[in-house]
Image (tube, coloured by chain):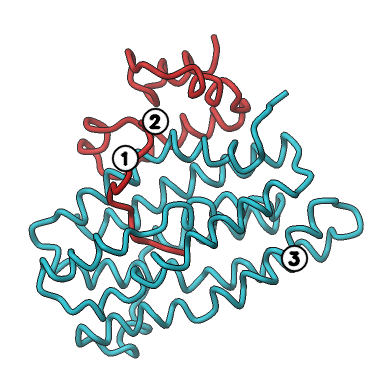
Chain colours: A red, B cyan
C-alpha cells in the first residue's frame, strides 16, 4: 500500500480525492514517520465536526488572495 | 532520489496538509462577531509570538553544541543569528494593537496563555533540545510561509469598525514576511539536509499546522 492509499485508508485524505501526479509524488515521498505523524494528528484535529466534515487534512493549495491565518512568527 | 529543492519539498508538504489551518482562518475572519473576537485572537497571537525569539535562541544553543560534528549547524546558525534581530520586538507590536483597543498590557501579560500555545512552543523545545534544531525550520516555514494579505486586513479592520492601528502586527508582517519566506527558502536550499532532516521538518510542520489551528480556533469557540 503506498502512502496515498494509507492516508486515504486512515481518512487523512478523503477517499475519492483526485490528486495530481506531483501531489501523489509528494505524498508517496513522505517517510513512514511523517505518515504516522499525519495519521496521529488527524485524531487530534481542532474543530470537531466542522473540520472533519468540511476539510480533510490534505487539501488543495489556497487560491491567490485566500485568507491567511494571521498568526505570524 | 528527490529532484525538488529542499525548500520546494517542505513547502509542498505544507501546501498539501494546511487545510485545517485555512479552515480556521476562514471561520475566524468571516465570523459575524469578529469585532468581539479579535482581541482574544490577538491575545493568542501574542501567546505564540512571545516564544518566537526564545525558540530561535534555543536553536542557536543547540546548533553551537553540534557545530563541530554536524554540517547543517553552521548554515542554521547564520540564519538564526540574522533572523533573531529581525523578529525581536514583534510581540510588542501585538501588545500595542491590544492597547489601541483599550487593553492594558500589564493585564495581558498577567493572563495565563492557552495550553494550546504552550503545546505549540513546547513541541519545538522538545525537538530542538532532544532531537535536532532543524525541526524549528519546519515551524517557521508554516508561520512565515503565507504572508498576510495587507489589503484584506485593512478592509477587515474597516468592515468591523476597528482602527487599522489595531491591526499593525498583521499589516507589518504582510510587508516583511515575503522577504522572510524567501530568506528561509534560500537557507534551506543551501543546507546539506538529509532525509532524516526532511522527515523532522515535515513532522514539525504538520504538528505546527495542527496546533496553530487549535490556538486560533479556540478564539472562535
Position of B189 compared to B46: left or right?
A: right
Give the residue at the far right of this rendering.
Answer: B68
For label 3, the SS is: helix
Instruction: Tell me the quarter of the image containing the C terminus of chain B.
Output: bottom left
Residue that numbered label 2 is attached to: A58
Of the two numbered discs 1 and 3 in the rendering, the one whose residue sits closer to the viewer? 1
When the figure is inspected, residue B37 is found, relative to residue B1, above or below; the finding is below
Q: Position of residue B99 (x, y in %)?
A: 27, 87
Measured Cα–Cα span from mark 3 to mark 2: 33 Å
Q: Position of residue B205 (x, y in %)?
A: 52, 45
The chain letter under disc 3 is B
When the figure is inspected, residue B95 is found, relative to residue A11, above or below; the finding is below
Q: What mark, if any, has residue B57 been given in the picture? A: none
When the figure is inspected, residue B2 is found, relative to residue B117, above or below; the finding is above
For label 1, the SS is: loop
Residue that numbered label 3 is attached to: B78
Amino acid at each position: 500500500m503506498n502512502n496515498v492509499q494509507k492516508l486515504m485508508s486512515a481518512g487523512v485524505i478523503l477517499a475519492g480525492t483526485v490528486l495530481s501526479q506531483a501531489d501523489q509524488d509528494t505524498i508517496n515521498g513522505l517517510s513512514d514517520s511523517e505518515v504516522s505523524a499525519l495519521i496521529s494528528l488527524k485524531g487530534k484535529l481542532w474543530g470537531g465536526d466542522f473540520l472533519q466534515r468540511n476539510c480533510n487534512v490534505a487539501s488543495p493549495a489556497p487560491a491567490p488572495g485566500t485568507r491567511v491565518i494571521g498568526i505570524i512568527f | 532520489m528527490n529532484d525538488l529543492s529542499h525548500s520546494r519539498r517542505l513547502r509542498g508538504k505544507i501546501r498539501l496538509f494546511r487545510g485545517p489551518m485555512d479552515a480556521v482562518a476562514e471561520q475566524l475572519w468571516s465570523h459575524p462577531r469578529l469585532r468581539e473576537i479579535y482581541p482574544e485572537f490577538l491575545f493568542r497571537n501574542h501567546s505564540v509570538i512571545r516564544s518566537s525569539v526564545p525558540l530561535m535562541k534555543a536553536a542557536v544553543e543547540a546548533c553551537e553544541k553540534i557545530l563541530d560534528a554536524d554540517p547543517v549547524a553552521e548554515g542554521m546558525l547564520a540564519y538564526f543569528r540574522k533572523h533573531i534581530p529581525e523578529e525581536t520586538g514583534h510581540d510588542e507590536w501585538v501588545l500595542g494593537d491590544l492597547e489601541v483597543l483599550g487593553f492594558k498590557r500589564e493585564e495581558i501579560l498577567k493572563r495565563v496563555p492557552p495550553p494550546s500555545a504552550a503545546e505549540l512552543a513546547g513541541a519545538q523545545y522538545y525537538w530542538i533540545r532532544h532531537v535536532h534544531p532543524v525541526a524549528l525550520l519546519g515551524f517557521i516555514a508554516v508561520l512565515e510561509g503565507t504572508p498576510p494579505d495587507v489589503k484584506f486586513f485593512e478592509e477587515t479592520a474597516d468592515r468591523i469598525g476597528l482602527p487599522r492601528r489595531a491591526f499593525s502586527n498583521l499589516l507589518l508582517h504582510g510587508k516583511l514576511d515575503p522577504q522572510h519566506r524567501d530568506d528561509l527558502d534560500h537557507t534551506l536550499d543551501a543546507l546539506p539536509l538529509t532525509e532524516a532532516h526532511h522527515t523532522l521538518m515535515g513532522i514539525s510542520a504538520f504538528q505546527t499546522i495542527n496546533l496553530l489551528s487549535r490556538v486560533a480556533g479556540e478564539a472562535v469557540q
